[in-house]
Amino acid sequence: METLIQQLINGVTLGSVYALIALGYTMVYGIIQLINFAHGEIFAAGGYIGVITLSLLNSRGVLESHPVLGLALAFLLAMAYCAFLAVALERVAYRPLRKASRLALLLSALGMSIFFSNGMMLCQGVYDKAYPTQLYATGQFTVGGAVVSYIQVYIVAGAVVLMVALNLFVNRTRLGKAMRSTAQDRTMSALLGINANRTITITFVIGAILAAAAGVMVGLYYGSVRFDMGFVPGIKAFAAAVLGGIGNLTGAVLGGMIIGLVEVFAAGYLASEYKDVFAFIILILVLYFRPTGIMGEQVDDTRV
Amino acid sequence: MATDLIRLGVVLAWGFVLLVPMLGARLGFDTFAFEWTRIWKVMGVLAVGGLLVVAQRAVSARRPDRAHAQHRSRVHVPAAWGWAALGVVAVVFPWFADNYARDVAINVLVYVTLGLGLNVVVGLAGLLDLGYIAFYAVGAYTYALLNTHFQIPFWLALPIGCVVSAGAGAVIGYPTLKMRGDYLAIVTLGFGEIIRLVLNNWDAVTEGPNGILGIKAPGIYYPVFGEGAVTFVHFYLKSLLWLYFVALAIAVVTVVGVHRLDRSRVGRAWISIREDETAAELTGIPTLKVKLLAYMLGAVFAGLAGAFFAAKVRYVNPSSFVFIESALVLCIVVLGGMGSIPGIILGAAAIIVLPEVFRGLELYRMLAFGGAMTVMMVFRPEGLIPAGRRKRELRGEAAAEGDAGA
């Protein structure tokens, strides 16, 4: 029973991270029908900026005196950086290909993914960069025999805050409305005076902000980041987005949770070395039996 | 000119913002240092490169006729001559090369085979496969296991490896082919990873990450005319010179095979599926079967290359079959020109030989390939040596985009 609760807690933590990344995939796919392969690398870049900020603050002694401020700064800088990165990515690799074939766009995304992960490797080296974890939020408490660390609480709480903010943004603001209408019909909304390019850029920026937060969270949770850390979570998060129904925000969160839980339970009860395999198998099964996902509507040829 | 310079300024400023934290911060264990020198170096390279582009644009804007003339005055050499020359070079080359050059050449031939195999799937049938290296792994492990457990020789294992690879292609292809476009890409990526993870973890059969040792090289029997009777002597083709010719034979079989497939009824069916699947289906092409065939035949060539790889290195382990290898093969196909056989040969040569020439820049290899992939898609989606049909199709769309942008 304790292990079950423990797995559940770990699964939800991991699931929140996947959900944050999956939101970026699903928004971008919803608006330009592109699997943004470089999204995983943006997530990794967020993790790197987090560790760079925290190390800088740590070396100046700020982290010891103001741990909460330091963490907030790490998140904010990571988000800002990834926003800049996503704008550059969209402008350089995707905007010139608006009218090109889908295959060309996808290959361009793949190229950028390889470019970014290798760029990070060249900048920061091939080895793990350790978060100075000893200085903040080290406590833990027990619930029904299961150990919950404060980091896990912060991750889930942070993810919930971001998701609520995203929901408000998409449903309550003019920009959110522009996003939804561009996703629905780009030509029509352009005719109605919505700047499609600007809306697409904003979509990328929001996705990148969420991914950056996820990157810092993963860094805090596992204690380190690596240049290739974006690849596998990127695929899993995409699987989550598809599982939930691509283009659907609630679906992405749901899919992220499911993938996170499945991974943790599979690792705990079946075979830990095959945990990645389970995520891929879910992806394949979903695409085979219900390509529209759990929450997805009927998708026609032009979208799939 | 002025607007170009302003643009360059924006690009440089943007790049600067992105580079400063990533490149400048030097993290040690519990230490933090900041280095400006690396940033200035990279910024310097970017600025010089940008200025060259701006200058080039300014010059070509002033002399538009000349820029056009350069495009038109292509020397036209009959294709057969080119192939004959290439064949002669391929046969003569290893006799004059040292072992290092032979090794590089063998790698090129292996990647030519892989590139052409993937070309069947991506270039002809238009199905983006991001897990292609899995079939290479299947071929390699098939030969490795057959040889180490049952002492089955290379030439017998080669067809078996092809059949097993084709089987794997069918198993992976069948459930995925109902999907279209990008979903297919992500699922093949998933399958590729599954196969690698299984190879890595199924210790009882694959020895896990340790890999399989003691694989035999390809052998041949040659006759010795003794006293009255002819005896056959077995001889392992261990030296790189002989292995080169085995690789060449495999590559030639692949080139001829893919060329014939391209011109065949099935090849035209693939192209029609690539262009418009619904229309293809309506004209009576059994799309599912034909796509499955593309997968299986693509896998066969990867299986050939894989078995050869295992025989050449005489050792296999899962780390040879990571995703980045799939990306590399895809890069060859894209760079060379999707659907174009000479293009893919050139692409394979470029991608294998260039990093060897620029040895000091080895680290930047994948960075350059990733960047090149995007740059190719933006500026020259048809590849270095485009296949005729593909070129017209892609250029038409690119031209429309150019008009809208200007």
Image: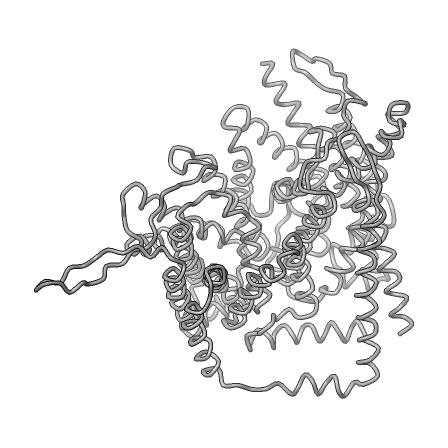
Residue at 69% x, 44% y is A248
Q: Position of residue B158 (x, y in %)?
A: 33, 55
Q: Position of residue A73 (x, y in %)?
A: 87, 34
Q: Residue furthest left?
A: B228
Name the residue nearer the viewer: A303 or A215: A215
Residue at 38% x, 33% y is B204
Q: What sort of colour scheme is used for the picture?
A: one colour
Quadrant of the drawing holding the C terminus of chain A? bottom right
Which image quarter: residue B405?
bottom right
State how many labels appear. Answer: 0
Name the residue nearer the viewer: B359 or A101: B359
Q: Is residue B58 above or below residue A107?
A: below
Report whether residue A302 is seen. yes
Indicate left or right for B47 with B117 as reference: right
Which image quarter: residue B371?
bottom right
Residue at 80% x, 61% y is B46
Quadrant of the drawing holding the N terminus of chain A? top right
Residue at 80% x, 55% y is B42
Name the residue nearer the viewer: A84 or A5: A84
Q: Position of residue B140 (x, y in %)?
A: 40, 49
Q: Position of residue A104 (x, y in %)?
A: 64, 63
Indicate left or right for B89 with B223 as reference: right
Report whether residue B265 is seen. no
